[in-house]
Image (tube, grey):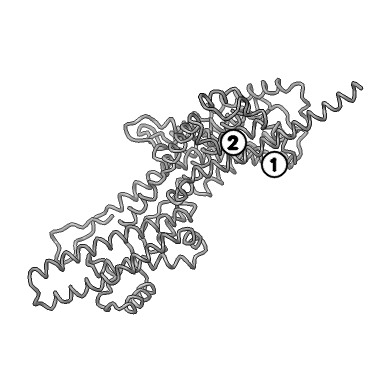
Amino acid sequence: MQVDITAASAAASTTSTIYFSVDLLLGAVFVLFYAGTRFNTPSTNRSSTTAGRYFVGLFLYCLIGICSYVTLVAFPNLLNFALFQHQMGGAAPTSKISLPLFVALLLTVLLPKIPVLNSVDKWVCTQLQNMAAIPWEVLRLSTELRKFKLEFSADEQALVQQTLEADGFDRKDIIFELTQTPASDWTRVTALLQKVEDWGSDRRMAGYLAASNNDLANLRQRHQAMSSRAKTCFYLRDEEGRGGTTRKTHQAMLRYEEDFSEHVKQLRKDILEFIARGVLRSELTTRALESRLSSMGFKVNCSDPAFSLNQLLLIFTVVCLTMLPGFVFFGSKGMSFEAMLIRLGLVGFTYVVAVACAVLPKSHWRFARLQAGEVRPIAFYVVAGLMSAAISFITSLTVQTIWMSNLDWAWQRSRLTYPWLFVSFATAVLTALMVDNPRFARISGRTQRCLEGLVQGLAMLAVTFLTCLWLNQRVEVFKNVDLRYLEYRPPQVVMTMVMGAAVGCVIGFFIPTWYRRHQEQLAEQRTRSLTLVPAAPGRSTQTVMSA
């Protein structure tokens, strides 16, 4: 009888564990869904900044939401603090609902009703949206578009001219050149709106037009409403040219023309903002965004990214080749060839991610760049390290799950080996620190890059040593667990330190120098863009600057 009771208790415990895991997973899905919705409220947030900035901010916001969810589930006593002086309608709200689902309910539907959690959530969301330049990036881009020179192809000019003539405009009032006249302003804003209309045949932009159909319809209505005013303005100017008008009539014509020009400029500003939102929403990279604007006729100065894909692939290859001897001669015992290649590729990818997190945001985030006369951006160093560690953890968990075909085993292995994230964190921090080094005048460039490689190699030597000590402590925690099914063996300390130092030397030798060269090239491009242009005939007393 006792055996039956024990078996029943074990079965009940197993069933309870399964239900708890399901509830935990469902709660995490709900939290992520509501976090994404809150971060994109209003719905124009995505089209207010670049894809990279938006998704980085969204990732960090979702990461904070998941961490809060796991923390409240793991430490239920914190719920008393979160629900301080707030009644949920019962003495024990979790008595009739599982703890994970109750915490998910607090962080989603009931979040606006919990003062403590709601205030913290709003502050975090606001800070991350500011970091992602929401909505400042679309305002900046639309302002830049007003400065860029806009050109129209022959086909576009023919189509716009045909449209305006069909609408009753005289051919002499259709002027595509920028002449600062009402006729030029009206013709160019009509051609600019026609460029937007052409997006309907583009698969990437058609989705944006469908989502922003009301805004586009408003622009069309405003343009159509101003058509009659444009005809009146051009008619009055023609009458002025024929002569015979009084001074009062001339003043009235000027005021009408000024009012019309102001409305045309406001319409042009709104169309440019509509274009800015469209390219920000539809294009994922800065290069694609600049290419889209160039194809529309905007004379944009395209700048190369800090690191090209080929450079990142070169770093990946060099890291893999550096670590390959250690894997072959010291790490292949009891490991299949496929497993060795997968882990080698995973390690190489981890280092490349660390480099990308340390360098690429400097081109987009102001707080990531070293400002003259200010302290180094230490906050960014920490953010870059956390991003690198988070991406490495998710990638490792995904790869291990696919390889082992068991999520529970992959999770247990991640719990055992998470000290490796310290290597990813330290690599990103050290790389971000090194790329902010100035060019030292007292030593040659080759000597400086060798010293930087040596310094980062020694730092990574210490980091891998601490990581190995940490991993050995984790193995002691799991000493009563059979680790063979996890396909894990503790690393060899000496060989791990040597490989870590070698990779650190490689990254320190290449990355800071590449980044400084890229910055010098950008400075040279800015200098060339501010060259003097010879004055036109008849304007010898003026100097024209082209930027």
Q: What residue is drawn where x is 21% and y is 60%? A: 534
Q: Can residue 143 be seen in this view?
A: yes
Q: Quadrant of the rendered structure where residue 106 is?
A: top right
- Residue 226 numbered tag: none
At which x and y percent is residue 488? 73, 31
Residue 157 point in image, percent of width and height: 35, 73
Marks 1 and 2: in contact by CB < 8 Å? no
Give the residue pinned by disc 1.
341
Q: Position of residue 289 (x, y in %)?
A: 44, 55
The x, y position of residue 88, in whole percent, is: 57, 30
**Residue at 42% across, 54% down:** 277
Mark 2, other Cα within 10 Å: few <14 / some 14–19 / many ≥20:
some
Secondary element type, mark 2: helix
- Please identify the residue farthest to the right as the structure is shown: 1
The amino acid type, in three-letter code, at marker 1 is Leu
Q: Earlier in the sequence, mark 2 or mark 1?
A: 2
**Marks 2, 1: nearer the viewer:** 2
Three-letter code, disc 2? Leu
Task: Using the rendered view, name the quadrant where residue 109 is placed.
Answer: top right
Q: In this view, does 65 lie to the left or right of 536?
A: right
Residue at horizontal 53%, vertical 43%? Answer: 36
Residue hosting label 2: 105
Hey, which residue is sitting farthest front in the picture? 89
Measure the C-alpha gap from mark 2 to mark 1.
43 Å
Q: Is mark 1 on a helix, strand or loop?
A: helix
Q: How crowded is mark 1: few (under 14 residues within 10 Å), some or many (20 or more)?
A: some
What is the quadrant of the C terminus in the image? bottom left
Tell me if residue 473 comes above or below residue 519 in the rendering.
above
**Residue nearest the viewer, comparing 506 with 110:** 110
